[in-house]
Amino acid sequence: MSAPTISHTAPRTYQIRTYGCQMNVHDSERLAGLLEAAGYTAAGEADEPDVVVFNTCAVRENADNRLYGNLGHLRPVKDGHPGMQIAVGGCLAQKDRDTIVRRAPWVDVVFGTHNIGSLPVLLERARVQREAQVEIRETLETFPSTLPTRRESPYAAWVSISVGCNNTCTFCIVPALRGKERDRRPGEILAEVEALVAEGVLEVTLLGQNVNAYGSEFGDRQAFAKLLRACGDVEGLERVRFTSPHPRDFTDDVIAAMAETPNVMPSLHMPLQSGSDAVLKAMRRSYRQERYLGIIERVRAAMPDAAITTDIIVGFPGESDEDFEQTLHVVREARFSGAFTFQYSKRPGTPAATMDGQVPKEVVQERYERLVALQEEISWAENRRQLGRVLEVLVAEGEGRKDDATQRLSGRARDNRLVHFRRPEQEVRPGDMVTVEVTYAAPHHLVADGPVKAVRRTRAGDAWQARQAQPKGVPLGMPSIGRPASAPSAGCSAHS
């Protein structure tokens, strides 16, 4: 679809506010690319944009309240800014449709997860017709990979390999909003990866709602393992990650591909959700505790230094004290380096929302605090095992909030651990590589306060430096490549 050119005396500016999972973050990069192809420019951080786009998430209970609160704050701003437009897209837009315009009639455009490519046309139509435009498609209109993209990072990139999900987890509304799984052809994916590397990207993260089910649409159960191995043949690609897999589809050929492909990183995010077989059955998770722990054991056998993270939901309907103890048992056995932990929240339209045995809030809170305390203890112990190790760190931008005060820089080790290191005398840019020795460990990060052992300037660092000469856009609320590090804004990945 060719985007229309917006004809105004000065380019209209935009800002995108992103909530939720990595898929939404990547969609926001597409939305930014679409708007810029249509003649818009990113608003400066201190400027009032002409167009504000909310890319929403519907997974968590307070998603609705958060959106309508933000829309309410924008109403007086819009009243004082003639011509300003507000658009709402993403999973909540797909779910609520006409409700958004009814509750917030000052919204100009509502679009869904299947037609993000329509945004520039809908904005122009709303401007000309002076009435809200609501367009929600039930099936995917254009695979997002065909749309223009404005990537936030010059050194690391998301690459979508599939959209949608064929699972029917009782707590999750994502399949209803994203649709059935659709897979891209391997050649298209690899062409995008090669193009990114040619632009300077060193690290890619392969994205899918159920990333390791890739190939189900065209009937190749080993397609994901083959794709990982093919990424190993892309010259100049130094790091490959993926998120989020599902234990049901996590097969030994994928473990072998990870272990045998040098640029596939020794890090794995494997959602658990619960350690109780009874709760897993009620969740419609097609694995049980024994199978899950078996996967972890085989991953560790193949990659002893792999860092494994997970998602866990506490207080699912019907969860007993014994069920919860089974979750704690798996956490102790698996020894995750980190976990995204969530208190169960009802989502209208999901089977779990009407199940018997809803767990009282105070019980959920007590269990949640016990789980977090146990995982913090394990995370800290696992990180202390890194003391004295020499790590190669990909220097990141914006990962260390205290870096200026501490005179440090930050980045990610190969296993995805966050490392804060002493700023060396020589120039180091985001996208460059440094070699450091770990001197201190905290539950969620490592510190290397000794001298930097080596600095390797990279094409990615060159690309970052070249971008600094270009006009800066507005950040998309993008989590750092290679997540997780700390609890995310609860998105689709929380329920993979």
Image: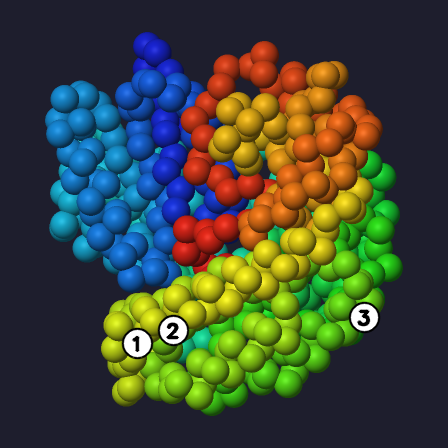
In contact (CB < 8 Å): disc 3 and disc 1? no
Q: Residue at x 55, y 36 (%)?
A: 399
Residue 32 locus on image (x, y percent): 46, 33
* Label 1 Cα crowd, 10 Å radius (few <14 / some 14-19 / many 20+): few
Q: Tag 3: residue type?
A: Ala
In the picture of the structure, the residue carrying the numbered disc 1 is 363
Q: Whole-Å distance between the Cαs marked 1 and 2?
A: 6 Å
> Looking at the picture, does residue 441 appear above or below residue 293?
above
> Looking at the picture, does residue 455 appear above or below residue 323?
above
Q: Whole-Å distance between the Cαs marked 3 and 1?
A: 37 Å
Q: Whole-Å distance between the Cαs marked 2 and 3?
A: 31 Å
> Looking at the picture, does residue 269 appear above or below residue 318?
above
Q: Residue at x 75, y 69 (%)?
A: 299
Q: Tag 1: residue type?
A: Val
In the picture of the structure, the residue carrying the numbered disc 3 is 301
**493 with respect to 394 (left or right):** left
Q: Tag 2: residue type?
A: Arg
Question: Can you tell which quarter of the image residue 432 is in?
Answer: top right
**392 with respect to 243 (left or right):** right
In the picture of the structure, the residue carrying the numbered disc 2 is 367
**Marked residue nearer the N-terminal end (3 or 1):** 3
**Marked residue nearer the N-terminal end (2 or 3):** 3
Residue 303 locus on image (x, y percent): 80, 63
In contact (CB < 8 Å): disc 1 and disc 2? yes
The front one of 215 and 135 is: 215
Viewer can see residue 235: yes
Q: Could you say whether the residue bearing mark 3 is in a helix, strand or loop?
A: helix
**332 with respect to 97 (left or right):** right
